Image (cartoon, rainbow, N blue to C red):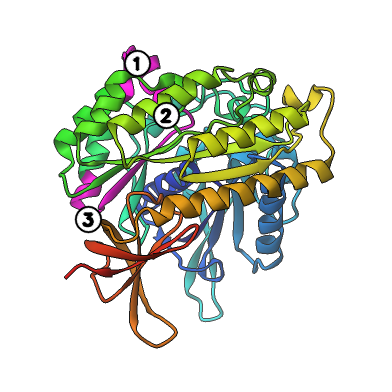
Amino acid sequence: MKYHLVTLGCPKNAVDSEGMDGLLAEAGHTQATTADEADVIIVNTCSFIAAAREETLGVLRELASGKREGQQLIAAGCMAQSHGELVAAVPGVDQTLSTQQWMRIADLVGGTTARTTKQGQAIPVLSLQPAPAPVAEVPPLPGYADWRTTQIRRTRSTPSAYLKISDGCNLRCAFCTIPSFKGDMASKPVGAVLAEARELVQHGVRELVLVAQHLTDYGRDLGLRDGLALLLEELCQVVPETTWIRLMYAYPHGISERLIQVMADHPQIVKYLDMPLQHAHPATLRRMRRPPDTERTMALLTTMRAAMPDLALRSTFIVGFPGETPEEFRALLTFLETMQLDRVGAFRYSQEPGTHAATLPDQVRPQVIERRWHTLMQLQQGISQQRMTRWVGRTLPVLIEGHGTDDDGRPLAVGRSFRDAPEVDGQVFVWGNPPVGEFARVQVTQATAYDLWGEVEG
């Protein structure tokens, strides 16, 4: 059986797709490069905001319209659970598989019958039941925790890999639907994380990107205190100093003195932290059901930079949240000017049915949201340019990911520094031919607002 996987959404979805890939490969199925070559197409869907759901439905419709006779289409993951009726209603979707059921993909694909070609050769095809009537929330299946020990088969061609250390979230932010279909946080045991990290390193991975809905809450359900710091200390015992460990989606109220010290002490842990703050005005944060202690957050960032002077800080913010006044928005801009974050992403507020935020009064007009988004991004572009210019004349390690040529035909490599997370941040362009999958020492010669340019040292 040939299968083709399409992954939409965040890195956590990418990890689940790799889990499905591993289970299918173990069951003897073969991955197809394109959907046209596959007997079954699997779309790991995203349900984060309305735009993501529209993209999911568009992809499903496009794939369904191109199906040939006998080819099957499975919609798996977040939207298959959160908006199962919409997904199942797409003509051509043969089956749905919720975010808490993806580990059953091999059982679903494994049910085959046979058809024949004109030459009489048997070809396996799926024998699936019609897409079931979905429900708003699918309770965890018996053995749902199996995701924490499922063998992951890595298919990424880049030298970095995502390593999910927990799933679900205990927070109930006013704007977020994720806990409604992911459930409360479930941490992967330390031993399972270490085993997966060892295997990834043995297969040549040079960067482990730790991901979770709430990274700094890791281990609370396992009875661990300072669980992320403990996990990192253990990881640094099994991961060589020549391999990066990157932290994504850390929340400020879970960052302890011990965690800061562990990050500062171990060379494997890149001096980078993604901390989605969402806003900076206490009143807005209260409406978001987020901790409103902006002064504490600013003090924390200052402390972290004192411990790690080159620390690259990334954050995301929401503009136009219900009730956001001009004063509250100006407070957010002032926060950005004061803290000088290296990387910033901004979301235009999306009114999500079923969230507390959707019921709040004083919804901000779309035109105002759009104007504020452009104002914030223009301000941050200037800040990013200043932060990048600091690196001109300095040398830093770059993980090389590909080769090409510049406009004059000279060889040009592309990679990322410790300041650049895969897929969300900028890149480093390097004149020369350093090998892909290895680190090169690069002297920076130019900087733009998002990317660096340089030459291999020596």
Q: Is residue 200 magenta?
A: yes
| Label 3 packing within 10 angstroms: few (<14), some (14-19), many (20+) | some
Residue 325 location in percent, x, y? 77, 28
Kindly report which numbered mark, 3 or 2, lies closer to the viewer in this rendering.
Answer: 2
Please indicate whether residue 156 sits to the left or right of residue 294 in the image.
Answer: left
Q: Nearer the viewer, residue 97 or 120?
A: 97
Image quadrant for the N terminus?
bottom left
Question: Which residue is label 2 attached to?
Answer: 301
Residue 400 location in percent, x, y? 30, 64
Amino acid at circle 2: Leu
Residue 78 location in percent, x, y? 59, 39
Q: Are marks 3 and 2 in contact (CB under 8 Å)?
A: no
Mark count: 3
- Indicate which disc, 1 or 3, sits on the residue closer to the N terminus: 3
Amino acid at circle 3: Gly
Element assignment for label 2 = helix
The image quadrant that residue 457 belongs to is: bottom left
Q: Nearer the viewer, residue 119 or 396?
A: 396
Instruction: For marks 3 and 2, give the CA distance.
Output: 33 Å
Q: Is residue 207 magenta?
A: yes
The image quadrant that residue 330 belongs to is: top right
Residue 10 location in percent, x, y? 52, 45
| Label 1 packing within 10 angstroms: few (<14), some (14-19), many (20+) | few
Residue at 30% x, 57% y: name it.
Answer: 159
Kindly report which numbered mark, 1 or 2, lies closer to the viewer in this rendering.
Answer: 2
Residue at 31% x, 38% y: name it.
Answer: 309
- Vertical relation: 293 (above or below) 260: above
Element assignment for label 3 = loop
- Indicate which disc, 1 or 2, sits on the residue closer to the N terminus: 1
Report the magenta residues as a range.
199-228
- Vertical relation: 285 (above or below) 69: above
Element assignment for label 1 = helix
